[in-house]
Image (cartoon, rainbow, N blue to C red):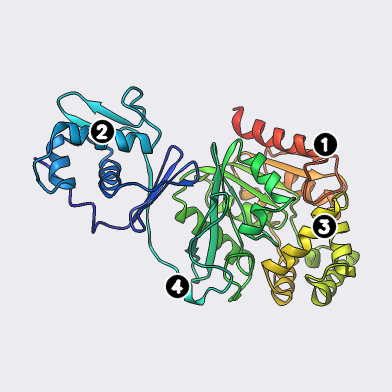
Amino acid sequence: MKTSVDVRGKTEMQYKFSDCWLDTDTREFTRNGLPNSLEPQVFDLLVLLLENHSRIISREELIHTIWSRRIVSDSAIDARISAVRSAVGDSGARQAIIKTVPRKGFRFIVEPAACKNKSKPDTKTHSPAVAIKETRNAQRIRYCLSRDKTRIGYATTGNGTPLVRTGHWLTHLEHDWHSPIWRPFLNTLGESFSVTRYDQRGNGLSDWQLREFSLERCVEDLEAVVEASCLERFVLYGTSQGAPVSVAYAARHPEQVSHLILQGGFVQGRMVRPSIEEAAQGEAILTLIKHGWGKPGGAFIKGFSSFFIPDSTKEQIDSLVDLQQKTTTAENAVTIRSAIDHFDISALLNQVSVPTLVIHARNDSVQPLEQGQSIAAGIKDAQFVMLESSNHVILEQEPAWQVLFSEMKNFTHNE
């Protein structure tokens, strides 16, 4: 009889299936993004079924592996199988995930996504947060290491088609989860997608010690998050600075990107565009950041909000001040902003072969409309949608909000 090695002591793995996530190293299990504490035998039984999903596990093998060959009644085995089914949202009647094969045993019939836990972050040197932090609304924040060992914080929320939101300037996983700007956005996006997002290096809950900030390093951060999240194929959504990073990733990994959505993006940063005025504007923004970062009521926050979200409420503007104070230092903000202004993906656009949707606000002051049009023109068969808005970040109180999410859902779900 073929038997499995004891589930304890095997290679550390993460598994994703249905709306569940399991880590064999930390012995964590979540369903619908909510933590679920399983009894040790129930957890081990689930791991055994996951690791052997391609075959039937007999009752004899269950006894050998889970109960170490002790005498166990059929009713005890059935009770544990029932507990596993309940944990993963299945039942004996449905058998949509765990199937009973009469006189043979049990089989896990859903193909799980699995990946090895290759590295564990050193939490002692990370100042913004601890390695895994529970938030009030059950968002789970985890960490992975990019190629140059920069620590990147990421989280997955929502339900539906897997979607990765590429990291961009000025995010904070925990602050955004409670922000009057970003929480409505995440809630709405999470109605149609299982959203994996992360703080880019130098921001939020990722490593604030910038070894290097460049387009290549940003792509490597995205690659690390995708691998750590066990994602094989997904929608890639890049907004603002995340758009060029997403283009570079999609050109490099077309087999993983089912759909590419680019919103408020650009082909060339301000400092490499032919316009002298835009270069001067970039320098002015850097000067304002140096002297006004995170200061409420100052010239910078007034200019920043009128630039990024001119149609915002006072509450939304106030949240930007709090975000600046929490997400990074003024020095990091200058370094990141300066690097972004030198991004150039002109040579990469014709290398993108995945279905692409480009969305841009008509009166976006951060990235002019022509930059979005240039992206759409450079990617073969890309679709272009113009939003009637002046905001770089689309807000829930404006009509463009419904158009944005409707276009995203139709593009990814109606094929």
Label 3 Cα neighbours within 10 Å, binned few <14 / some 14-19 / many ≥20: many
User: Circle 2 sits on which residue?
Assistant: 107
Q: Secondary structure at mark 3?
A: helix
Q: Quadrant of the N terminus?
A: top left
Q: Are marks 3 and 2 in contact (CB under 8 Å)?
A: no
Q: Secondary structure at mark 1?
A: loop
Residue 182 percent across, percent down from the top left: 70, 50
Circles 4 and 2 in contact, beta carbons < 8 Å: no
Amino acid under label 3?
Answer: Ile
First reached walking from the N terminus: tag 4 or tag 2: 2
For the residues labelled 1 and 2, the Cα–Cα distance comes to 49 Å
Foreground residue among 73 and 258: 73
Q: Secondary structure at mark 4?
A: loop
Tell me which amino acid carries mark 2. Arg
Direction from residue 211 to residue 142 in the image, left or right: left
For label 1, the crowd category at 10 Å Cα-Cα, with few meaning under 14, some 14 to 19 and many 20 or more, is: few
Q: Quadrant of the C terminus?
A: top right
- Looking at marks 3 and 1 on the same chain, the residue that comes earlier in the sequence is marked by 3
Which of the two labelled residues, at mark 3 and mark 2, occupies the earlier sequence position? 2
Considering only order in the chain, which callout, 2 or 1, is on the residue closer to the N terminus? Answer: 2
Does the image show residue 269?
A: yes
Question: Which residue bears the numbered disc 1?
Answer: 399
* Residue named by callout 4: 122
Residue lying at 28% horizontally and 38% vertically, measured from the top left = 53
Q: Which mark is residue 317?
A: 3
Image-quadrant location for residue 276: bottom right
